[in-house]
Amino acid sequence: MESQYRPRELEPRIQQRWAATQAFVAPDHSPKPKYYCVSMLPYPSGKLHMGHVRNYTINDALCHFMRMKGFNVLFPMGWDAFGLPAENAAMANGVPPAKWTRENIAYMKKQCEAMGWSIDWTREVATCSPDYYRWNQWFFLRLWEKGIVYRKSGMVNWDPVDMTVLANEQVIDGRGWRTGAVVEKREIPMWYMRITDYADELVDSLDGLGWPEQVKQMQRNWIGRSEGIEFTLPYDEEASRRMSDGHPDGSVKPPGLKVFTTRADTIMGITFAAVAAEHPLATEAANGNAALAAFIEECKRGGVQEAEIATMEKKGMRTGLFVRHPFTGDKIEVWVGNYVLMGYGEGAVMAVPGHDERDFAFAKKYGLAIKQVIDVGGQPYSLDEWQAWYDAPGRNVDSGKYDGLEQKAALDAVAKDLEAKGLGRKRVQYRLRDWGISRQRYWGTPIPIVQCPKCGDVGVPDADLPVKLPEDLVPDGSGSPLARTPSFFGTKCPKCGGAAKRDTDTMDTFVDSSWYYMRYASANASAMVDERAQYWMPMDQYIGGIEHAILHLLYARFWTKAMRDLGLIRIDEPFTNLLTQGMVLNHIFSRRTDKGGIEYFAPEELDIAVDAEGKVSGATLKAGGKPVVYEGIGTMSKSKRNGVDPQDMIERYGADTARFYVMQASPPTDTVLWSDESVEGSFKFLRRLWAMVHEHVAKGIVARYSGGEATRELADLRFKLHKTIEKVADDYGRRMQFNTAIAAVRELLNLYSELQDASPVARAVAQEVIEDAVLLLSPVVPHIATALWSELRPGTDLRDQPWPAVDASALVQDQIELVVQVNGKLRGHIRVATSATREQVEAMALKLEAVQKFLNGQTPKKVVVVPGRLVNVVV
RNA sequence: GCCGGGAUGGCGGAAUCGGUAGACGCACGGGACUCAAAAUCCCGCGGUGGCAACACCAUGGGGGUUCGAUUCCCCCUCCCGGCACCA
């Protein structure tokens, strides 16, 4: 055996052997139980970053562990290959997105191979491949036929200088990132999917999933199912006349202002009403009111991001129009408020400043009446105390016939009365909105629709799919390249044969990632999926960043249900268990460009200054010395340019060190701030492991311990070994906490290295311990483990070894150590027989000198005995 | 702003169901080996006081429940993620 650990020679050799024997190609049928484990597919940004290393190493370790446990394991890989960064790279370098993307994929695939992940590459998927995206198009058409896909107008961010639609990411502080121009909202026609049709099921079926509770909670809150009442505030004479004279959308004249509320019990507290700037009533009121028209224009300025809208200062203006209270007939003034969202409910609210936080802030600002209609324990009405009582439970007061009712009863009574008057009804409202999938971009799946002047929207016939994306275009940042390419959009109507135009929008990339895991399972199928998907799905374990907790996971769940309803798969949920990996963070540095846009810098391009506390205080460019702005820490991302390439680590220490490092550093669910300081320690450990095996082998390998007389020391070592096997299996399989599993093996090896005994029994125990330690670590560091195993058991392969068995007899103990506390503070230890009674334990504890000292001759007030753990003497 | 999460030594983290706070490492200090260095090995390592035994303090801050709280409850601060066109 080599005395030196040389990962750079060893790892490629072992990887070649795996490739030659197709070691990780998973059969689609097996007598073994299946285990399907997938990591969220990476965006091919150029190089792997540490987040990927963490993600796929967790995936790989779980897969190795499950193989050892006797499962038929599938670990596939693919590329989320459409999207914005490819277009940005194209603009920067003049290279078509297709070329850039494919080169990145090739490089990153090499890196994956160098990491030694046990991927079944025969199932690789790249979402930019026509073989893949044709099924996006095919499925889109099926959903269209079913009415799940439909067209309506939607709001986008508009850059008036570049004349282009901006992604939210491209809007920085309300300005376009390239031009620095103030962004505007613009309404354009788009395709939508009716995810809201599935809202109830998406909430209800969360319950059965093995997902982190926090993720399920986030999804529930996102869908935001709330039961409330939709009712009408009738117009007064003036409003009635104006709204019927020229109702802007020309639809049926509404008899009043429709609102939705979950707090109808506070209906007697209405002091005004508010509508969104885009509401038809606002439009009508602005007719001939220049100030209001200007205010509405102002509301439409700025981007469409919710965070931006929600943090805006609350502003409003009178419309001069009035509605009437449904019960009292009192006149209620209607305001336009920038805090009312057109996209939620009816785009209009009844305002009860006494019992709603936003209405309160608005009323206070404009000096509107605030009326308390819920009694909250006799507290006096006081604006200063308002924060304390606005949403407290209580009985109705100052509410006429509803006085004295509790919330639920008041709600029911109000609903009944509104229904009786024909003004309202109970209804469920979701916060969730339908999924808009149209993007005015080039690098995505073309929408398979032809717009015919005679026939309207016509679907591309299945036989003509895929509608291929031209791959040689280079975007320039203004408008969509497809919309300027007649050879793409010029076509004939499939229905009438006349000249027609293709839809030049592409699909949201969330479409691509909504079903790729089913395509892996039915690789190269001539349909979207086939029966093999049914074998592998639902996925046993899904792993990915917590940042995908809502959107991606919700869309994928919806998509799966839609596929089920079209008879393509017979499952309700795609992901049985979910592990949300914490993000790998790094420092972010940026600078404003001359144009007013923004530019990011990688840490290696900068000289970074640190203050006395070790915190980053500033930075300058290495080239040129210009200062840059420190923006704090954030997720490693391509756009912020703060990723760390693991390549150096692989080249210096090998893949096993990189793998070991990320796995031992922290629990997978934790966020970590990148630091490459302790990588060296991981390498030293592997070298020490190698040295231990080398030393053992040099003394001569023997058959592992299988019974016979053992000294106390050997029995203790075997106890530790078998406890460790139990713990590591639990950490890998149930807790998925690899850092503590590795720490446990280190403890075992620390104990092992103290062993001096060279007797035949000791040699057999040593063989047992070192063999099993290699097996326990093998899921994390498969290369070194494979090499060491072949020295410990010549002629056998690590890949054929099952997970080590726990020897129950090694775990039997006759004595245990208990902790003795006085008033909950540690004061000593006692060793007792495992069979000792409560009374015996108590007596022994009280006899301790450290305990007597605190007793001062008195009898203890109480003695708490926790079996197998501790004794607490209360004095 | 709203939703979800987090905060433990100089650093990463451990304590799994309310039961020994700091496992296991990194960094650092001291020592051994060496002509020297690297590598390796041994010892120490939360704070304050003390020669020591030991005592007290300590898990972001404040309060509470409990024999006992890093863990449960209430309030607060700061940080991270998401907020529908980044993926």
Image (cartoon, coloured by chain):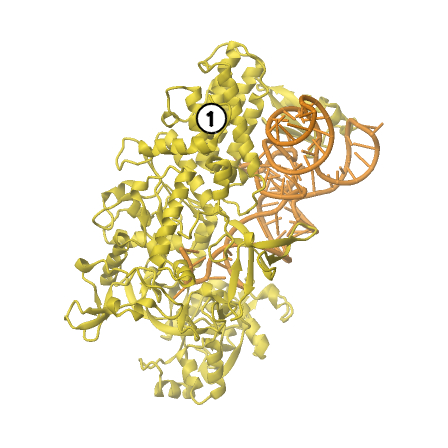
Residue drawn where x is 53% and y is 29% of the image: A687
Whether residue B53 is situated above or below residue A151 in the rendered picture: above
Residues A367 and B29: in front is B29
Q: Residue A788: x and y, percent?
A: 45, 25
Q: Colour of chain A?
A: yellow
> Which amino acid, mark 1?
Val
Residue drawn where x is 54% and y is 27% of the image: A688
Q: Quadrant of residue B36?
A: top right
Q: Quadrant of residue A391?
A: bottom right
* Residue density around tag 1, few if under 14, some if 14–19, many if 20 or more, within 10 Å: many
Q: Which residue is mark 1?
A: A774
Whether residue A54 is situated above or below residue A472 in the rendered picture: above
Q: Residue A628: x and y, percent?
A: 59, 61
Whether residue A842 is situated above or below residue A222 in the rendered picture: above
Residue drawn where x is 50% and y is 16% of the image: A698
Q: Quadrant of residue B71?
A: top right
**Total count of labels:** 1
In the figure, the orange chain has which letter?
B
Say what secondary structure mark 1 lies in: helix
